[in-house]
Amino acid sequence: MKDEVSTAATLVLIPNNADSAQEWMAAFADRESVNLVLEGDASANAAIGALVFEPSPGALDAYKHLRVVFNLGAGVDALLADEDLPDVPIVRLENADMSALMREYIVYQVIRIHRGFGWVEQQQANATWHAMPAASSASHCRVTVLGIGRLGAPTAQALRAVGYTVVGWSRTARSLPGIPCYVGRDSLDTLLATTDILVCTLPLTAETRGLLDLGLFSRLPMGASLVSVSRAGCLNESDLLLALDSGQLRHATLDCFRSEPLPSSHSFWMHPSVNVTPHLAASPQAAVCVDEILANVQHLLNDEPLRGVIDRGLGY
Ligand code: NDP
């Protein structure tokens, strides 16, 4: 494939594990116009761009020629927590695969909860056969999506297409065809009272930290459920356990955790009402992200606006 970048630019990869390093290096291997090198490589000091996912604090400080940092994901909370983060644009991934993966994950998890399929899987594991109560269709199930951005909006639309009664909530006014959208804390309290399944796709920011707490859970109808793909900092874990144990919440599906991998001793693993997935909701393959990164390198070299730049002040 022919790249748009005409002059070779050095990019440095600071991977968060060996497998992802191999995958990213392989994805760029046939892109001769860009020289992707691993941190520690002799030519890494010349890098104008860094590809990172949750690097250690200070890891970017060594690169004095950086003009851009590519975050190999959507959430930038860990990156922004680095006090030595270079003062260059931070670009996040925003490709179609990522939003498709998120849409698929959340639609699956919502249906799994609404139709009680976790219980059905448990029956097979125990070789037992119990008739389920007659099910109600999706239209009787009210889903509120917190965060209707690049991932939340297509998810809300997909849930609506399945038949769910969907509303969305965001920081600023948004409009989605067929989906009532709301803004602000007062409206949230009203929305929660009519929510059967709460879906959280919010970024972790100063405003959303700890938002999913007992106060919020208590505003949901008794027996509501939660699906969260947001960073663990949005959730008060002990409040979640209290809400589950009291029956205020019936079920929680969680994809992100304060400590990853989730320690084997963590109570979420064995909790009958918690479904743990290992931070896999929407991690696109490196190969599908290369063009998006190369296009931004081209924009950088042409002094054109970059796409997917996050707002450091807002934190997303
Ligand atoms: P976007 O920036 O596109 O959208 C964020 C949405 O959240 C926007 O609708 C925004 O409102 C809303 N929002 C932000 N702050 C507030 C607030 N204080 N109150 C109400 N709404 C708020 O992000 P993405 O949709 O791409 O990603 C969202 C998050 O999903 C990421 O930050 C990441 O943490 C998580 N994620 C998880 C993955 C996983 O595999 N588990 C994979 C990828 C992402 P507005 O529209 O008004 O700006």
Image (cartoon, rainbow, N blue to C red):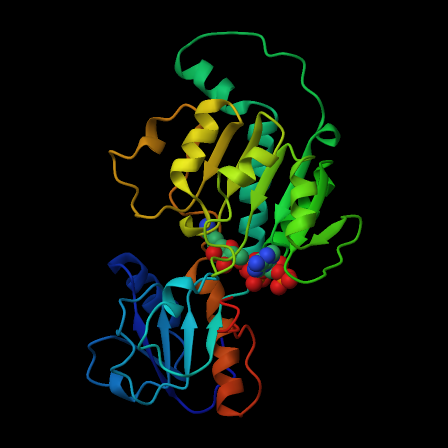
Point out residue 61 in the picture as x, y percentages from the top left corner.
27, 80
Point out residue 21 in the picture as x, y percentages from the top left corner.
29, 64
Residue visible at 24% across and 33% down in the picture: 265
Say if 99 sits above or below 237 in the image. below
Residue visible at 46% across and 80% down in the picture: 89
Residue visible at 59% across and 48% down in the picture: 103
Say if 202 sits above or below 213 in the image. below
Say if 117 sits above or below 28 in the image. above
The residue closer to the viewer here, 200 or 278, is: 200
Q: Quadrant of ligand 1?
A: bottom right
Point out residue 311 in the picture as x, y percentages from the top left corner.
53, 73
Say if 72 sits above or below 235 in the image. below
Residue 2 seen in the figure: no
Residue visible at 39% across and 40% down in the picture: 237
Point out residue 151 in the picture as x, y percentages from the top left corner.
58, 55
Q: Quadrant of residue 50?
A: bottom left
Q: Quadrant of residue 24?
A: bottom left
Q: Is residue 72 left or right of residue 37?
A: right
The residue closer to the viewer here, 18 or 112, is: 112
Q: Is residue 48 left or right of residue 175?
A: left
